[in-house]
Amino acid sequence: MPYTTEDGGRINNFAHEPKVYQAQAPTENEKRNNLILVAVSTILVLGGIAIAFYASTNAPVA
């Protein structure tokens, strides 16, 4: 681990810095997969909301 010694004999440790790289633009295939994932997620969330709404409005009265 890299370290330096300051005045007075104190030692400072530094973490290893990760290699920096530039992100790649998504390919057409990745864009299509992301669109499908968003569509399926939206359907699941809206379905869950619809089921909760239906269950709350049609609950039997005790």
Image: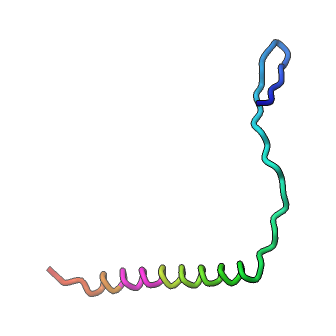
Q: Main secondary structure of the magenta part?
A: helix
| Quarter of the figure that contains the C terminus | bottom left
Position in image of residue 52 (x %, y %): 36, 80
Residue at 58% in and 84% down: 39
Question: Dividing the picture into quarters, in which one does residue 13 lie?
Answer: top right
Position in image of residue 18 (x %, y %): 78, 47
Image height of 23 relative to 29, above or below: above
Position in image of residue 30 (x %, y %): 71, 78
Of all residues, the one furthest to the left in this rendering is 62
Residue at 76% in and 30% down: 1
Front residue of 11/54: it is 11
23 in magenta: no
Going by the image, does 17 lie left or right of 53?
Answer: right
Q: What segment is highlighted magenta in the picture?
A: 46-53
47 in magenta: yes
Front residue of 8/25: it is 25
**Colouring used for the render:** rainbow
Going by the image, does 59 lie left or right of 54?
Answer: left
Going by the image, does 44 lie left or right of 56?
Answer: right
Image height of 57 relative to 26, above or below: below
Position in image of residue 35 (x %, y %): 65, 83
